[in-house]
Amino acid sequence: MEYKISEVVAKTNVPKSTILYYIKEGLLPEAKKIKLNVHKYSDEHIELIRYIKYMQERMGSSIEEIKEALRKKNSSFAGSYTMLAPLMKTLSDDSGLEHYTKQEFIEHFAIDKDLLQKLIEDEIVLPVNQDDFTKKDATIVTLVEHFLEVGIPYSILQEYIKHATILANIEQEMLEKLCDVRDEENFTTLWKIMFDTLFHAKKYLFNRSTYKLLFQRAKEEITQK
């Protein structure tokens, strides 16, 4: 379908000035010029505007990150992973954190290098890159130290790793299924499925499951008393 700019504004709840800015920045294709000062927009414009809005509001992606992602749009969900840049940044969970080399990391956080090496080999500490560590990594090392301090094995973390790998493979299967059904009209919906599953549904389901179990155990304990 074709739309006037006023109709695009109504459908997306994005101001005309912002839409024109997106076009100027190359985030959206030029509108079809019918005659002087009369332009028509397509379903693709609406899908892309919704995607941009979603990425900014829900994922905190910058205009430059979205621009780079959209540059790879046609290969996305068709076997290419190059469009996942905004997703990868969010998954790394290191935005705004100071980064250290391995040696700087050991010195700054007073970490036992042998323990760190073992945790890296066991994939309990997972730096984003081989020589790139943050406070997030130090938090995990400290947690392991607390386990060791009280004499309890940190096997729960090792189990987390096993299940995290299984879950990552399931998520990969989801991505492949999204690839199979991708077309120009469902672009935004597919990305919402991906991001909302990875960043909202996963946390919701895991935390609620833990809550339900703890709540049940607390009820049983009160009943026994």
Image: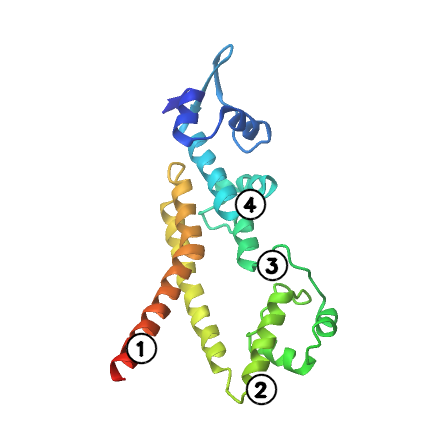
Give the foreground label among 2 and 1: 1
Observer-nearest residue: 141 or 42?
141
Q: Quadrant of the N terminus?
A: top left
Q: CA distance from mark 3 to mark 4?
A: 14 Å
Task: Kindly state the secondary structure of the residue where label 1 is placed.
Answer: helix
In the rendered structure, find residue 61 and report the number of the disc placed on it. Answer: 4
Q: Earlier in the sequence, mark 2 or mark 3?
A: 3
Q: Position of residue 216 (x, y in %)?
A: 29, 74
Return the residue found at the far left. 223
Tell me what residue is drawn at x 50 percent, y 50 percent. 80
Q: Is residue 204 left or right of residue 22?
A: left
Q: CA distance from mark 3 to mark 1?
A: 35 Å
Q: Position of residue 29 (x, y in %)?
A: 52, 28
Q: Quadrant of residue 221?
A: bottom left
Q: CA distance from mark 1 to mark 4?
A: 41 Å
- The residue carrying mark 3 is 94
Pointer 3 with pointer 1, Cβ within 8 A: no
Task: Kindly state the secondary structure of the residue where label 2 is placed.
Answer: helix
Q: CA distance from mark 2 to mark 3?
A: 28 Å
Q: Earlier in the sequence, mark 3 or mark 4?
A: 4
Give the foreground label among 1 and 4: 1
Q: Earlier in the sequence, mark 1 or mark 4?
A: 4
User: Label 1 amino acid?
Assistant: Arg
Q: Quadrant of residue 126?
A: bottom right
- The residue carrying mark 2 is 149
Q: Position of residue 223 (x, y in %)?
A: 25, 80
Disc 4 packing (10 Å; few <14; some 14–19; many ≥20)? many
Does residue 83 lie above or below 20 as drawn? Answer: below
Return the residue found at the far bottom. 151
In the rendered structure, find residue 217 and report the number of the disc placed on it. Answer: 1
Q: Earlier in the sequence, mark 4 or mark 2?
A: 4
